[in-house]
Image: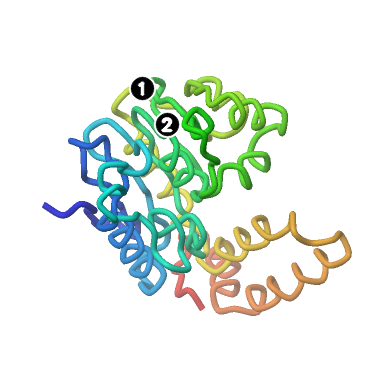
Amino acid sequence: MSEVEVEQRDGVQVITINRPEARNALNGAVARGIAAAIDELEDSSDLRVAVLTGAGGTFCAGMDLKAFLTGDVPLVEGRGLGGLTEAPPRKPLIAAVEGYAVAGGFELLLACDLVVASETAMFGVPEVKRGLVAAAGAALLLPQRIPQAIALEMLMTGASIDAARAAQLGLVNRLTPEGGALAGALELAAQVAANGPLAVAVSKQIARSAPDWTLEEGWRRQTELMMPVFTSEDAQEGATAFAEKRPPVWKGR
């Protein structure tokens, strides 16, 4: 069995880390498998959104330290940890979390745009407990996703939070009963996939980039990015479908 399983479901790509015996810890094969899946997502006109999850009731327990000691590093050059953290896809990516999303697994989650988690899920960055820094995205990105003081508490104590607290902080979009995270993520993915793919991708690009722009620059850059969407075939189709009271047929152009 592959260490990363990939399937398609009605325009949604499902990427599953498949190392349940190791709590889906990241090794080189997993990193390369996720990177290859992201390439497929970006290259396929049939795929609108992806869901990242883990097999066997755990999202991901971070880097496989046993593999690391043998020189098997879960990095892909230019893409970061797990083949994802430094180069998320242009298309939307949703995390479906059961069990633990900790250390590098939590940083995979931060590379995702939306998070659906079971009520029993746990989240944390325990690197400081090992004298390390959460350098695959958590120290950089967590303060942008939750209040800075809470992010600093997690980063400096290494303590975990449960799913209810993560949802309260806005880190988790939707909670499900235990075992229901993937189904919940697929439901959310279907809602995203029903919309114009160009509009969705550019909306994500603007929202993700905005913290790096000044206000003046933001208005200018937003206009540059959105104008091709406003003049696209999809924009015409969206207006026509609304007028004709029918579902739109998107072409992605």
Mark linked to residue 117: 2
Left-right relation of 161 to 2:
right
Residue 28: where, in percent of width, then height?
A: 29, 57
Identify which residue is drawn at 18% across, 35% down. Answer: 21
Q: Nearer the viewer, residue 13 or 252?
A: 13
Place residue 73 in its image quadrant. Answer: bottom left
Question: Circle 1: is it few (<14), some (14-19), or many (20+) Cα within 10 Å?
Answer: few
Question: Circle 2: is it few (<14), some (14-19), or many (20+) Cα within 10 Å?
Answer: many
Residue 19: where, in percent of width, then height?
A: 21, 43
Residue wearing tag 1? 177
**Nearer the camera: disc 2 or disc 1:** 2
Residue 253: where, in percent of width, then height?
A: 51, 78
Place residue 217 in its image quadrant. Answer: bottom right
Q: Is residue 186 above or below residue 127?
A: below
Element under disc 1? loop
Left-right relation of 89 to 40:
right
Mark linked to residue 188: none
Residue 16: where, in percent of width, then height?
A: 27, 48
Identify which residue is drawn at 51% across, 59% down. Answer: 86
The residue type indicated by label 1 comes to Pro
Q: What kind of colouring is applied to the model shown?
A: rainbow
